[in-house]
Amino acid sequence: MERQKPGPVGRPPGHGPTRDEEHEPNEGQPSGPEQSNNLVVNLSNRLLNAEEMEALNKGLGFVPTPRMDLFKLNCEVHDFFRKLRLKIFFEGKPTLESEDDTGLRPKSSFNPPVSSMPVEVQAFESAVLREINQLCPLDPGVFHNMSTRESMAVKTMSMDRTIIIKPADKGGATVVWDRRDYQTECLRLLDDTRNYRKLESDPTIGLKQSITMMVEHAEVNGWISPKEADFLICKNPRIPYFYILPKIHKNLTHPPGRPIVSGIGSLLEPLSRFADFFLRPIVQKTRTYLKDVLRLLKDVEFDVTLDCLLTFDVESLYTSLPQDETLEVIEQILFQEDWEYRTPRTFVLECIELALKKNFFEFEEQIFLQTHGTSMGSTFAPSIAGLYVHYLEVGKILCETNPFLSKIKLWKRYIDDILVIWRGTECEAGAFAAWLNCQIGRAHV
């Protein structure tokens, strides 16, 4: 199917069609019986017209030309001034942080007074504010990067409660889903009692009390700084919410969903970020860790006459992690590390256990607890998943008990994606893939 190109983001005044003329020839016409292309996949019962398809073609990250908002502009300019003043104010001053400080703390509102700034900075700020106040609220020469009909199409779709629009899990497409089908797929995942359990009430209050007691104990013992303690206790937490992204690369007509929990501003997210400060450096030191393509090219020695490339991925890695076993693996790894932090390993493990085993969220006004695995969207999820898979790699794959070990010339992994340089036959590779599935499960070549 031919890829439809989105329209230009901008053009000089007086060139091309006007905002209202841009789509006049095909106004209101449906975009075709398939209602899909490489950028938009319509799985709903709503027949999208040309303007709706064109608007969606621009992508969910597309930003329409904003109207001039002098108040908002002034707020952003003053925020810039504050960053500039902070840079100048603290330049050359020694930091009071210890070497093992995590840097995690609540956001500061400190703003150095303008009188403490050099005269050049004061003059610059005054000149910028003077120029802004002279701006016209709306420049008639501004080119709108969406036509009037496209803007109306976006508004109409946003008001339609029978559909839901999501980015595809892979490939960059925009997917229009019937809301009922979306909800059915979400509930199909949440009804899996191996991974989730419905809760009768919101556990926020009780869990916040437990976290507060744990953090205050750590602060009293000098394991964390007062700023870190303040960061770890979320004052006004929001309940994380559950959503899915359609895996249209697996099934175009009835795509399964990739479960994600948005935990920004939630009770457990500070614990996850704090734990990840200690876990991420350990992950980056593991022998199979793949940092980037440049590092891979440096490590690769490939003989085109003898070698071939194999790629694997671990299916549903995050939700497949056994929680108790993962905690045991991480504890074992932490106590093997040379520890130079003032925060003891036991406190880091407490944070990990709470964030992993008390991971609750909301969907359709119902509260669920994740009883198996961890959620995609949690800060420490890549680190704990990476350490668990590395434990399996070292203990079951890159060891003498592997009958195919001599065939593996290079084994590198980025979270759940594995790259192998294989010196063997295609038949042997198939046998290795079958053997690998028995060792780590859910691996596909």
Image (tube, rainbow, N blue to C red):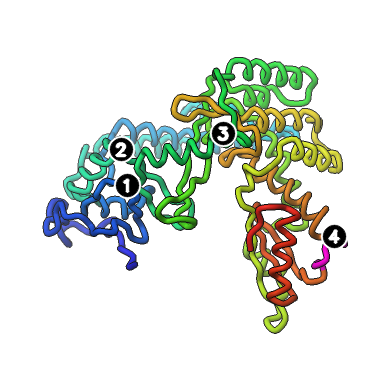
Residue for badge 1: 44
- Identify which residue, 20 or 69, lies in the foreground: 20
**Which numbered disc flags the more N-terminal residue, 4 or 3?**
3
Question: Which amino acid does the dot numbered 1 rest on?
Answer: Ser
Q: Nearer the viewer, mark 4 or mark 3?
A: 4
Q: Position of residue 195 (x, y in %)?
A: 62, 36
Residue for badge 4: 399
**Which of the 4 image quadrants contains residue 134?**
top left
Is the Cβ of the residue at disc 1 closer than 8 Å to that at disc 2?
yes
**Which numbered disc flags the more N-terminal residue, 1 or 4?**
1
Q: Residue at x 83, y 40 (%)?
A: 332
Q: CA distance from mark 1 to mark 2?
A: 9 Å
Left or right position of 285 against 294? right
**Which numbered disc flags the more N-terminal residue, 2 or 3?**
3
Q: Position of residue 70 (x, y in %)?
A: 28, 34
Residue 54 sits above or below residue 339 on the image: below
Is the Cβ of the residue at disc 4 closer than 8 Å to that at disc 2?
no
The boundaries of the magenta stretch are 400-405
Residue for badge 2: 162
Q: Nearer the viewer, mark 2 or mark 3?
A: 2
Question: Which amino acid does the dot numbered 4 rest on?
Answer: Cys
Q: Secondary structure at mark 4?
A: loop
Q: Residue at x 57, y 22 (%)?
A: 199
- Residue 89 is tagged as 3
Q: CA distance from mark 2 to mark 3?
A: 53 Å
**Which numbered disc flags the more N-terminal residue, 1 or 3?**
1
